[in-house]
Image: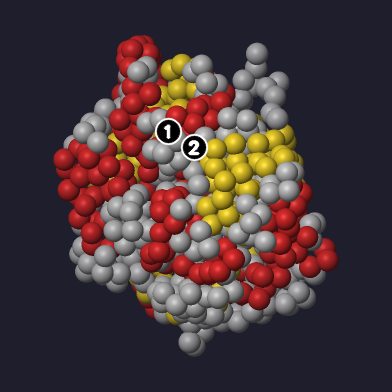
Amino acid sequence: MAKTLFEKIWDAHLVKALPDGTFLIYIDRIFLHERTGSIALQSLAEAGRKVRHPERVFCTMDHIVDTFPGRGDDTVMPSGKNFIQATRKEAKAAGITLFDIGDDRQGIAHVISPEMGIVQPGITLVCPDSHTCTQGAMGAAAWGIGSSEAEHAMATQTLRINKPKLMRVVFEGELGAGVTAKDMILHLIGQYGANGGAGYAIEFAGSAVENLSIEGRLTLCNMAVEFAAFTGLVAPDQKTYDYLEGRTYAPKGKDWDEALTYWQSLVTESDAAFDKEIVINASDIEPTVTWGTSPQHAAGISQSVPALESLASDDARTAAQRALDYQGLASGDALAGLKIDNAFIGSCTNARIEDLRSAASILKGRKVAAGIKAICVPGSQQVKAAAEREGLDKIFEAAGFEWRESGCSMCFFAGGEHFGAQERVLSTSNRNFESRQGPGTRTHLASPATVAASAINGVITDPRTFTEVN
Amino acid sequence: MDPFIRHTGVSAPLLRINIDTDAIIPSREMRLVSKKGLGEGLFASWRYVLPDSREPNPDFVLNKPEYANTTIILGGNNFGCGSSREHAVWALAEYGIRAIIAPGFGAIFYQNCVRNGILPVVLDNETVQSLAAEVEENPQVHQLTIDLEQQTVTSFSGAQAKFEIEAGHKEMLLKGLDSIGLTLTFEDDISRFEQADGAKRHWL
C-alpha cells in the first residue's frame, strides 16, 4: 500500500504492536531543557533507573536561563538557578551531552538541534517541550511530551503511543511580498481553529511549502502544536540535504551517501491516503496578526477585530468576548494602527538568522518609536554570532533594540523577566495566551518583518508599507 | 500512581474553550525542581486577586464555598492546550483533582494526565454542558460519579453518559501501572529492534 512520509517513519520505528492497542515506537534522539528535563533526569535517578543510551540524549539551557549580557546561573526569578544547577548536575551524572551557559552551541532546543544536525530526516525525536514539532521541518517525526514520558524515553529508548491520524495541509501558489511562513501558519489556525489539527500528524506540502527555506519550514512546523496537532512535518528535499551537510552531527563520507539514499526514499507516495486534507491558496494570505488570546484569534493585517456574531459557536463567541476584554479591544477595531508598548523578536518560532535579517532590513537606518521597549533575543549563540558577523547587532542596537544572549526569554517568563500589565506587545513568538508574557500583558503575534515595521511606527504596521519588503 | 477505578465527587464547571497549561499553572509558580509544591499555584492567575498574591478571588469557581472539595473539572474543548509542562497535571493532582471531563484535550496534557492517575474523560460539548447545568444547581449534592471500568459518567439525577478511552490508557489508570516498568518487560523486543536498526541506519 502506498505510504505517507509519516507512515514510513512510523513503520521504521515500530518495535512492537502491544496487546492493549498501543504501539511501542523506537525513539532515536531525545532533547531536554532545564525546566522539564531537570525533573525528568532527577526523577529517573531517584527511581534508580539509568539512561539507556546517553549518547542519544542532548540537553540545553533555554527556558529559564537569563538572556542579559554577562549572564551566569542567576535569574531574575531567584529560584531559576535551582533548575539550571540541578540540570547541570543530573546531566553530568547521566552522561548526556549538555549545551551549557557559556558554550557557544547553547541556544533554544528547536533552533540548535537542526543547527547541529541532531535532527535528521526519518528519525524520531522527542523533547519535553510542546514546540518539538518545529523539528519536523527536517523530515523527522518530532513531537513534544511530558516529563514522565521523557523519563520513559530515556529509560527504554521507546514510547508507548497511539497512532495519530494523518492530515495534509497544502499551500498552493506563491506567497505575496512581505508574507512569511509565520503568516501561513497564523492564517491556517485563524481559518480552522486552535483545535483544527487535534489527533493528526500533519504533513505540510504544496509549492509554497517547497519554496520555503529550511528556516521558514521550521517556523511553519513550530506552530503545529498551536493547531493542536500531534506534530507537523515537511518531506525532506535537496534544501534539507544542503542545509544538513557538514553539520556537527550529520553523517559524513560514506555514511552521508547511505543516509542520503535512505532519506530520498522518505517521500509521500502520490497515491497515499490522508484522513483529511486542507488546501490553502498561498496568494490569499496577508501578513497576519493575532487580536485575542488564542492563536485562532488571527486576521490579516488589513482586517479589523471581527464581529462576535461572525464566529461559529457560542463557545467561540464567549471566548472571543473574554479575549477582547483582556486585550482592551472591541469588535471593529482596526488591527493596523493599534498602539503598541513593546516589540519582541525571539523564540523557537522566529529567532533564526533569516528572521533577524528580515527584521534588520526594515530597521536599518531607522529608530523605534519613542517609548517602545524593543528586545531582540537570537535563538542560539550561533545565530547571535552569525548576526554579529553580518553587523545585524549594530542595526538592532542603533534602532533602539536590546541585543541579548540566546534563550527562550520573554516568549513567556520562566526566568522571571516579563512585560507589564495591560502593556501591548507585538511578538514573533507563538502564544498569545493570557499572562503568557507577563501578568496581564497583552500579546499579539506576528512575523519578524511585521514586528520590526510596527516597532518603528509605534503602532501595528503592515510591513509592505516599507519599500525594503517589496 | 493511584489507580482510578470509580470516583464520586464535587464537580466544578470551567467551560471556556482552549484553557492552556499556562493558565493551569503559570511559569512563575514553578519554583522548585520537584513534582510537589504546585497545588497552591493551580490556576494562580484566575484564583488569586493579584499575581503572586494568595488572596482568593471570590469570583473564581474553585474559591466559591459551594465548590469546596472539588475533585472533578468540567472543561471546555481543547483543555490543557499549549505548553507541555507536566507541572499543570501535578498541580491539579495535588489540589485533589481526580478527573477532567471535556469535549477534547491537548494531546500532551492528555498523556500527562494518564501518567499521573488523573482520568481525562472525553464527552461531547452538549453532554458536558448539560452535566454542568445539573451540577450548578447544587454542587455539593449534585456530585458526578465516574466509573472507568464501565466507561460511564453518571449524574446525581441518574443521567448517564458513556465515554471512549483507549484500552492501553484504561488499563494504565485502572491498575495504577508504572509504564516504564511495563515497557521494560519488552526488553528483548527493544534489543532486537536496536540490532536490526543499527545495521540499517548505522550513521545515527
- Give the chain of mark 1: B
Please identify the residue farthest to the bottom as the structure is shown: A370
Viewport quadrant of the N terminus of chain B? top left
Q: Amino acid at mark 2?
A: Phe
- For the residues labelled 1 and 2, say whether their Cβ atoms are less than 8 Å apart: yes
* Residue A85 drawn at (x, y percent): 20, 55
In percent of width and height, residue A316 lies at 73, 60
Tell me which numbered mark, 1 or 2, is placed earlier along the sequence: 2
Residue type indicated by callout 1: Gly
The answer to which quarter of the image holds residue A269 is top right
User: Residue A447's spot in the image, x, y percent?
Assistant: 56, 62
Q: Residue furthest right?
A: A309
Query: Is residue A405 toward the left or the right of residue A267 in the image?
Result: left
Q: Which secondary structure lies at badge 2?
A: loop
**Neighbour tally class for label 2: few under 14, some 14-19, many 20 plus, Cα within 10 Å:** many
Could you say where residue A240 lies in the image, as x and y percent from the top left? 48, 36
Which residue corresponds to the image point at 73% horizontal and 48% vertical from the top-left?
B157
Answer above or below: position of B153 versus A429.
above
Residue A376 drawn above or below residue A233: below
Residue at 46% of width from left, 16% of height from top? A16
Q: Residues within 10 Å of mark 1 (few under 14, many from 20)?
A: some
B38 or A380, which is in the foreground? B38
* Residue name at image x 48 percent, y 75 percent: B56
Which residue is drawn at the image coordinates 59% and 74% (left, top)?
Answer: B59
Dot 1 lies on which element?
Answer: loop
Q: Chain of mark 2?
A: B
Pointer 2: what residue? B4
Query: Dot 1 corresponds to which residue?
Result: B176
